[in-house]
Amino acid sequence: MMSLWNQPYPQSYSTVEMTQPALRFDLVRQQTAENIATAKHLDSWEQRAKAEKKWLDAQAVHGIRMQLMQAPILPLRKTLEVSAPLPLAQLPPTMRDLVEATATALGVGAELVLPCVLAGALIASRGNFKVKVSDGYFEALTEYFLVIAASGERKSAVVGLFRHVFEQEEALRIKHSAERQGVAREVLRKATAKKKHELAKKFGRLYDECRDVDAVKNLLWDEIAAVERLDMAVCGDAVPRRILIDATTPQALAAELARHGEVLAIFEAEGRTLKQFSPAMDDIFLKGFTGEPYTSDTKTAGTVRLRTPMLSICVCAQPNIADQFYGNKDLVGHGLTARFLPLFVPTSSAMSGGGLADFPPGLVAPYEAHMRALLQIPAPAGTEGERAFHVLDLSYGAYKELDRYTREIDAQLRAGLCERYAAFARKLHGHAARLAANVHLFVHPDPQNHPIAPATMVCGIALAEYFRKHAAVAFVAEARDGVTYAPKILQWMERQRLAHFTEREAHRGIGSSRHTVAQIRAGIDELERHNFLRRYVSLSRSSICVVHPDAYRV
């Protein structure tokens, strides 16, 4: 019997079934060839489309370059510009004449002179005044001015001119203090020996009971302060009272305030004070603005207690320093930036001509005489060691003007019109009252004996609105970043000699790890406004920055 395995295949099976794999292979090969041909055909069309887009983009970029050649390149701004006229017409005549004459003589803009003049009166008042806004509501007569001006705007010349009188007064105080110390040394020893002896015995007895030096100091703080005041009174200011202090650390500032009657002023032209600000140590500046009690405990300086610290600040700074100040989220969150009145000095404010050599020597003589008169106004006597203040009352007309302005600000806040600088806007009515009192110091030689007039309040409100327009720009990061980053991007462009570039390339070029995309975009916007480049969205939807043909020749 033949095995099933040895039987031959049927003819039909061998001829039909055995040819099917070959047919299937031929079909696959044919289909693959067709697919390859189709793919090549599509690739060729894509390449042609890309080439056409590239050609169209090149034509568009060439057209943009031709348009740019017709547009002149404008110089980059060194600082922000605010379209707000200086309210000189509302100032008292003597004050207005001083600002205008000084600006003309020094060859600078009045925007740089006005805050220095205002700061001078606040420094001379020595923190001895408060403004009564309403029943139970008082504003300390201090202000923090921040003048933002580029290099070469003669900040040092203006600041030096108006702080010179205070430097002279400090020198006289040191001289007179040295003369009095020689006569009063023996008197001091006899007058205070008994009081010090009693205090030492009391201190030792309390220390034996609790063995805690700090606790005893806290308990006897008033008596210790009384002995220190006795020393000062008998010795005739053993430590001469300073008026000005240069940039220093917050701890040292608190210690100097304690030594010099809790009143000091910072009046400088290089912005060093802003560099010292730290979110962990800005409390002394917050309390110095309102006159609230301040306490500091450090290992080096020990315990420093201030009952009513009063600070007046006028700082001129370059735009990059001011940008770091307003860009610090912690300082903004703490409310420190809202206490400063910013002012952007236009770049073109420094004019040719004028200088200290041909400055009229008698021009600031009335200002200096008035500052000396304000320095001579004594503080009212306090009770039980508490400090007292001269109170500046508002006339009825001045109160109505301030009340109207307060209602306007409140309505704008509710409408969301001050969203970006809401913290500053909430303090505007207080700034208006302080600025009106500031101007009041120029109007009367004895300001404590006269109420603030309605016209003076109108002037204070006008000044507050002027600073408000500058604050509306200072608190906008995009505006600050444009002025800051445009020169950086331009320097990178000049190094690379690029005809066009993208935002990503610019971001990588100046350091992507240190700067955000929003900052780069703001800098490119600033360059575009000054005709250094034009943005073009290509057909591939990528943004290209086309550079002006003469950008590197400027």
Image: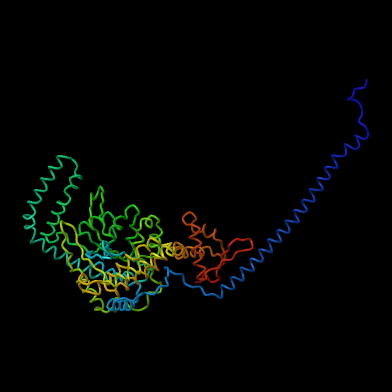
Q: Position of residue 388 (x, y in %)?
A: 19, 61
Q: Residue at x 82, y 42 (%)?
A: 25
Q: Quadrant of residue 415?
A: bottom left
Q: Quadrant of residue 453?
A: bottom left
- Position above or below: 304 against 132: above
The residue sitting at the top extreme is 1
Choose between 125 and 318: the one closer to the eye.
Answer: 125
Q: Position of residue 42 (x, y in %)?
A: 74, 56
Choose between 499 and 395: the one closer to the eye.
Answer: 395
> Where's the N terminus, which quadrant?
top right
Q: Position of residue 125 (x, y in %)?
A: 23, 67
Q: Residue at x 30, y 55 (%)?
A: 283
The answer, for residue 216, to whether it is visible in the render is yes
Position of 160 with respect to 38 (left or right) is left
Q: Position of residue 394 (x, y in %)?
A: 26, 69
| Colouring used for the render | rainbow
